[in-house]
């Protein structure tokens, strides 16, 4: 028997998530049966999609959705020995019984000196998203200029570094001066604090007077329309996220992008990481290689304690994180 804790969404979010939307549940889990394993969470991820997913597919009382790096602490499954680690979509739980479905073992070549938490970040879902957005959606080419917003976050910071590896000029926008310093350390050519620039239009023009070939969109909302006007003709836009709208109770109304898309002959494509599931193993190996070679730097914003999951999630939605936001149990 093990005492398992989980965080449930007690009440639908209305606007920005609040402490009162979450409740901590404790239950006893039985021993694993034949073919089952018992997992113990080591690191848990907090991600923007959780806010959006809660509107689309959750009901009150459901355990919060999410991924974690977990240790196998009991096993009656030959594929998952005790002591091994997996990435599991267990939700916000300390302990989970699993029959192995959907568990992804940590890559066997994972070096001892690389934190397993990166399997939730640069060598995990956000890193994969960055690669697919750049390679499959944008088809980014050497010498091109790319703009990424939420640039100091989990996805954005990997996007910028991969674009540099590919020989591009990279411009990033982020929400604090400390984030701008971080982006420069990562090798971004230009970076600015969108909260203090005054005019986004001028900041974009100053960073790249000749315009942008590619835009990796993480934020959405009215700023997107301003960016579209600074795209080069036949520019490409990968619509990865729209975090500025996730807490909206009513859909935003705004300027329609069609005329500018027609005049500039822009190509815009939304995508979900799940489209390229079949490529995950090979792509994770490439991301790990970049980390080992020192070409991909990984910063994390670590919150300690499972009891602080809601605070970590709300902090990330507020922009407190530099790099990937994770919780260490
Ligand atoms: N399509 C897909 O398959 C996937 C999409 N995504 C999307 O990628 C985006 C980034 O995710 P991820 O890297 O995990 O998160 P981040 O680590 O970037 O954290 C979220 C960041 O969003 C920024 N932000 C929050 N609110 C606003 C706002 N109102 N306006 C502008 N920026 C805001 C904050 O940075 P700042 O201080 O700079 O404002 C905050 O740090 C999200 O939109 C997410 O939904 C992520 C994974 C997969
Ligand atoms: C799956 C959520 C779909 C909502 C889309 C919202 C915005 C874009 C975005 O942020 C997408 C993220 C996709 C993440 C996918 C993660 C999967 O690898 C694991 C899902 C976690 C789980 O099943 O517990």
Image (cartoon, rainbow, N blue to C red):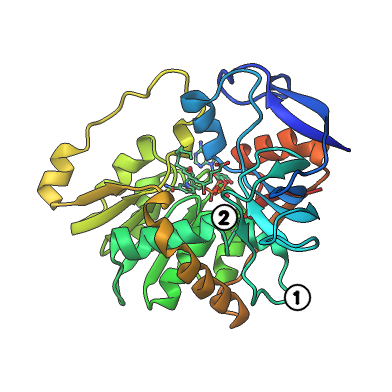
Q: Residue at x 63, y 51 (%)?
A: 100
Q: Which residue is drawn at 27% across and 48% down?
A: 269
Q: Which residue is drawn at 57% across and 19% down?
A: 59
The answer to whether the residue labelled 1 contacts the one labelled 2, judged by CB atoms less than 8 Å apart, is no
Give 101 or 257, whichever is nearer the viewer.
101
Q: Does the residue labelled 2 lie within 8 Å of ligand 1?
A: yes
Is residue 111 found left or right of 196 in the rendered image?
A: right
Relative to 167, is 194 above or below?
Answer: above
Q: How crowded is mark 2: few (under 14 residues within 10 Å), some or many (20 or more)?
A: many
Is residue 8 found left or right of 279 in the rendered image?
A: right
Q: Quadrant of residue 96?
A: top right
Residue mark closest to the camera, 1 vs 2: 1
Q: Residues within 10 Å of mark 1 (few under 14, many from 20)?
A: few
Q: Mark 1 points at which residue?
A: 113
Looking at the picture, how far across and down is residue 197, in whole percent?
48, 48
Pointer 1 or 2: first along the chain: 1
Q: Which mark is residue 201?
A: none
Q: Is mark 2 on a helix, strand or loop?
A: helix
Q: Which residue lies furthest to the left in this view?
A: 263
Give 211 or 51, whichever is nearer the viewer.
51
Asked if one can make out residue 36 in the rendered structure from this viewpoint, the answer is yes
Asked if one can make out residue 323 in the rendered structure from this viewpoint, the answer is no
Looking at the picture, how far across and down is residue 204, in whole percent?
36, 54
Give 325 or 259, whichever is nearer the viewer.
325
Looking at the picture, how far across and down is residue 15, in whole percent?
55, 21
Q: Quadrant of residue 138?
A: bottom left
Q: Mark 2 points at which residue?
A: 154
Looking at the picture, how far across and down is residue 273, in whole percent?
42, 52
Q: Which residue lies furthest to the bottom in this view?
A: 293
Distance from Cα at disc 1 to Cα at disc 2: 20 Å
Q: Residue at x 83, y 43 (%)?
A: 305
């Amino acid at each position: 028997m093990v005492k398992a804790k989980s965080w449930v969404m007690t009440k639908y979010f209305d606007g920005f998530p609040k402490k009162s939307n979450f409740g901590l549940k404790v239950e006893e889990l039985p021993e694993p049966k034949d073919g089952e394993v018992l997992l113990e969470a080591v690191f848990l991820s907090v991600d923007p999609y959780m806010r959006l997913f809660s509107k689309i597919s959750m009901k009150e009382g459901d355990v919060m959705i999410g991924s974690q790096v977990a240790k196998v602490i009991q096993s009656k499954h030959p594929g998952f020995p005790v002591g091994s680690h997996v990435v599991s979509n267990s939700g916000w739980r300390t302990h989970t019984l699993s029959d192995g479905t959907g568990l992804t073992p940590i890559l066997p070549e994972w070096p001892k000196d690389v934190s397993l938490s990166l399997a939730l970040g640069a060598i995990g879902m956000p890193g994969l998203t960055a690669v697919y957005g750049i390679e499959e959606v944008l088809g980014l080419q050497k010498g091109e200029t790319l703009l990424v917003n939420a640039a100091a976050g989990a996805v954005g910071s990997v996007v910028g570094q991969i674009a540099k590896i590919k020989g591009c000029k990279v411009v990033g926008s982020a929400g604090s001066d400390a984030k701008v310093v971080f982006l420069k350390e990562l090798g971004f050519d230009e970076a600015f604090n969108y909260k203090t620039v005054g005019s986004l239009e001028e900041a974009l023009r100053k960073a790249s007077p000749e315009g942008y070939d590619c835009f990796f969109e993480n934020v959405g909302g009215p700023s997107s329309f301003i960016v579209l006007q600074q795209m080069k003709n036949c520019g490409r836009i990968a619509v990865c996220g729209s975090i500025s709208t996730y807490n909206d109770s009513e859909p935003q109304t705004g300027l329609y992008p069609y005329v500018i898309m027609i005049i500039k002959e822009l190509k815009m494509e939304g995508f979900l990481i799940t489209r390229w599931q079949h490529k995950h193993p090979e792509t994770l190996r490439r991301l790990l290689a970049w980390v080992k070679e020192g070409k991909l730097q990984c910063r994390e914003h670590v919150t300690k304690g499972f009891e602080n999951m809601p605070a970590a999630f709300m902090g990330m939605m507020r922009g407190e994180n530099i790099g990937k936001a994770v919780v260490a149990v």
